[in-house]
């Protein structure tokens, strides 16, 4: 253990720390010793006559000892040490004050940088929010135009979902009925419901579900067919009985789903399914772009995709501290 701690290859910082401590306290020590020597010299100098003691001293070492150890020498050496210690302590304090001022300025600059960074980050977030809002309005307007073209009434609605990390996210939805347009959930499981079946098979049509007026049959059908829980079915704002969903495909990859649903049994009559197929085929590029843009804009999806929640501010501060 001793050989590991000391020597040229040792790991101990004992002597380094000891040297640093002595160096930092050297001037204070000089001032303290000087004070003691001045006190002792002053106490004995009044009645002390150097010449008398010098005449009584013989031999080199006794003469040297007398020169070094006497009240007059104590006064002289004490004064020198005290002045040295006081001057060094003053300069040390002056350097410390300068270092503190420099640190204060550095902290102010860091604070200004943080404030500027926060402002820039807030502006960036506001810009992102505006872009996301405009994108949502664009998709909403597109859904509204499609609903008018397909002549969907207030008992129906259309919703676009996109997939990320084994979950569906609601992009936008539209209905002439404001109650059905409201969004109550943002995420949905990948393995449940009409969305899941259309995601797996490219499309899915539901035209056998009982009307919600026959409450027990309606609930049992959704439980048996789609695996829904009863409390979830009962909490639905829109109790649809007819669905037609199509996968949104981008470069042969399923990226999302568009779902058409209605609360009435006659929802899919008058060749509505064929009209939806034609419209979605003609506008497949727009649907794919809506989904791609949503993956870029959606904050929660971006965080999950990057696998982190660290802000730009934290990154920069860590680099500054390195």
Image (cartoon, grey):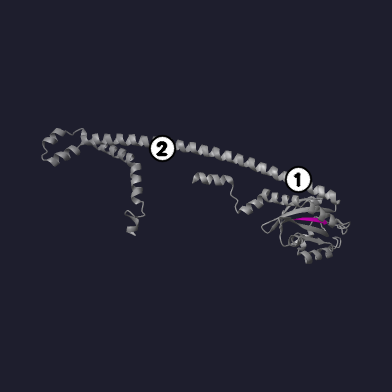
**Residues under labels 1 and 2: Cα distance?**
62 Å
Percent position (x, y) of residue 155? 85, 53
Snapshot quadrant of residue 57: top left
Q: Residue at x 36, y 35 (%)?
A: 91
Give left or right: position of 202 versus 34.
right
User: In this orientation, does residue 242 appear?
Assistant: yes
The circle on residue 138 is 1
Q: Secondary structure at mark 1?
A: helix
Q: Residue at x 52, y 37 (%)?
A: 109
Neighbour class for label 2 at 10 Å: few (<14), some, many (≥20)? Answer: few
Residue 42 located within the stretch drawn in magenta: no
**Magenta stretch prevailing secondary structure:** strand
Residue at the farthest bottom position: 224
In what quadrant of the picture does the N terminus appear?
bottom left
- The image shows residue 281, relative to residue 36, as above or below, that is below
Neighbour class for label 1 at 10 Å: few (<14), some, many (≥20)? Answer: some
Mark sitting earlier along the chain (1/2): 2
Q: Residue at x 84, y 49 (%)?
A: 149
Front residue (pair 133, 181): 133
Please state the extent of the stretch shown in magenta in the rendering.
257-261
Front residue (pair 120, 46): 120
User: In this orientation, does residue 176 appear?
Assistant: no
Give left or right: position of 106 versus 251.
left
Residue at the spot of label 2: 96
Percent position (x, y) of residue 140? 77, 47
């Amino acid at each position: 253990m001793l050989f590991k701690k000391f020597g040229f290859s040792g790991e101990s910082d004992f002597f380094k720390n000891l040297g640093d401590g002595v160096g930092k306290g050297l001037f204070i020590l000089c001032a303290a010793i000087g004070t003691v020597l001045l006190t002792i010299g002053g106490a004995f100098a009044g009645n002390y006559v150097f010449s008398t003691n010098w005449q009584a001293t013989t031999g080199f070492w006794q003469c040297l000892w007398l020169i070094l150890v006497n009240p007059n020498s104590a006064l002289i050496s004490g004064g020198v040490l005290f002045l040295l210690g006081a001057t060094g302590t003053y300069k040390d304090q002056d350097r410390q004050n300068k270092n503190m001022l420099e640190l204060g300025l550095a902290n102010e600059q860091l604070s200004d940088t943080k404030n500027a960074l926060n402002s820039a980050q807030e502006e960036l977030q506001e810009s992102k929010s505006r872009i996301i809002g405009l994108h949502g309005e664009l998709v909403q307007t597109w859904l509204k135009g499609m609903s008018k073209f397909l002549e969907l009434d207030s008992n129906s609605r259309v919703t676009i979902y996109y997939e990320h990390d084994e979950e569906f996210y609601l992009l936008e939805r539209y209905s002439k009925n404001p109650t059905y347009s409201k969004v109550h959930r943002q995420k949905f499981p990948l393995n449940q419901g009409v969305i899941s079946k259309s995601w797996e098979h490219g499309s899915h049509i539901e035209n056998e579900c009982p009307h919600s007026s026959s409450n027990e049959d309606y609930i049992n059908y959704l439980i048996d067919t789609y695996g829904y829980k009863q409390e979830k079915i009962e909490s639905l704002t829109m109790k649809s009985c007819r669905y037609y969903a199509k996968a949104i495909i981008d470069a042969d990859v399923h990226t999302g789903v568009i779902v058409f649903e209605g609360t009435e049994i006659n929802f899919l009559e008058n060749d509505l399914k064929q009209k939806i197929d034609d419209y979605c085929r003609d506008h497949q590029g727009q649907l794919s772009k809506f989904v791609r843009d949503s993956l870029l804009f959606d904050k929660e999806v971006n965080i999950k995709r990057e696998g982190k929640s660290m802000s730009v501010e934290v990154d920069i501060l860590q680099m500054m501290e390195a």
